[in-house]
Image (cartoon, grey):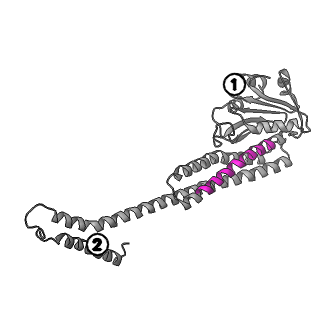
Amino acid sequence: MSKFIHLAYGFDGKGGAEALEGQAISQLIRDERLAWVHMDANHPDTKKWLESETDYLDPFIIDALLAEETRPRMTPVNDGVLLILRGVNLNENADPEDMVSIRLWVDKHRIISVRKRSLKAARDIEAKLLLGKGPKDSGEFICMLITQLFNRMEPVLLALDEATDDTEEQVLESGDNSLRERIVNIRKQAIIFRRYMSPQRDAIEQLRMSDISWLNERHKRNLQESYNHVTRYVEDLDAIRERSQIVKDELANMLADRLNRNMYVLSVIAAIFLPLGFLTGLLGINIGGIPGTDNANAFWIFSGILVLTVIAQVIIFKKFKWF
């Protein structure tokens, strides 16, 4: 098999498939028997192969399949459909929110999928085909692919929701300033996920409402179920984003209250020592006429005056409810 073709199967219409290699791929991709070719968009030979073997496709479709940046969308062309979807990035050392795109051209007799990074949902379908439990037609392939994308996505979104719960609990318990970064990261992930999930929801809805001949009522019921799932995911992401903002505001309020209390304590201490500092400073000047210089008990008398001053201040502060 060519380096730029990762998977190639001819479907038997019963849930199984046979692997294709070499010229068999080119031949079957033009026949009426359903075939699936999964390709690497990064390889320079991919575009050449698509242009030579799928010359029946409009050039804009090939350009869309190989585009650098994509957003989920659905574009019907005659009785086929250009479909771009996203799945969570489960590759090693990758961030799940850095979602991986899969670009597809699907019609009744062929499925051409292109990806730039590894996507586990494609391997999931391959495993089902090898077990004889895979898709039987193009409509079922799309439904199964969308289902696998969401099956991989649900644990990630659930973990994000649990992280929001844990962070909210920690904020209420400790109000530690170090939680700011965690809250920002959670909100950032929710925003990035939603950026792709919302147009993906629209693409699934457009596909469900389309009049493509090879999408039957059973397929459309499955697409409706997928639409309900992605709608719930979008609503959950909105809730996570709003909760994160509320938690962030609550943390900011707690930190502000803590700072205000500290400043209040310091202000009270400063207010108490202000007159004491004035008196000690006044009597500490080195000029003649300082009272008590000849009295052996002057120090204790002055100390008593300072104590009485503090007591008087405390009484006044209590009366005005300053503490």
Identify the residue at horizontal 23%, vertical 70% (top origin). 303
Alpha carbon distance from label 2 to label 1: 82 Å
Quadrant in the rendering for residue 111 = top right
Q: Dot 2: few (<14), some (14–19), or many (≥20) neighbours within 10 Å? A: some
Across the whole image, how many numbered discs are drawn on residues?
Answer: 2
Residue 300 lies left or right of residue 192; in this view the side is left
Say whether residue 35 is magenta: no
Say whether residue 155 is magenta: yes
Identify the residue at horizontal 27%, vertical 73% (top origin). 307
Tell which circle, 2 or 1, labels the residue nearer the N-terminal end: 1
Residue type at mark 1: give it.
Answer: His
Q: Is residue 323 above or below residue 192?
A: below
Residue of label 1: 43
Residue 153, image x, y percentages: 71, 46
Quadrant in the rendering for residue 41 = top right
Identify the residue at horizontal 78%, vertical 45% (top origin). 147
Q: Dot 1: few (<14), some (14–19), or many (≥20) neighbours within 10 Å? A: few
Residue type at mark 2: give it.
Answer: Val
Q: Check contact, mark 2 vs mark 1: CB within 8 A.
A: no
Residue bounds of the magenta highlight: 142-167
Camera sees residue 309: yes
Residue 243, image x, y percentages: 59, 57
Residue of label 2: 310
Q: Quadrant of the N terminus?
A: top right
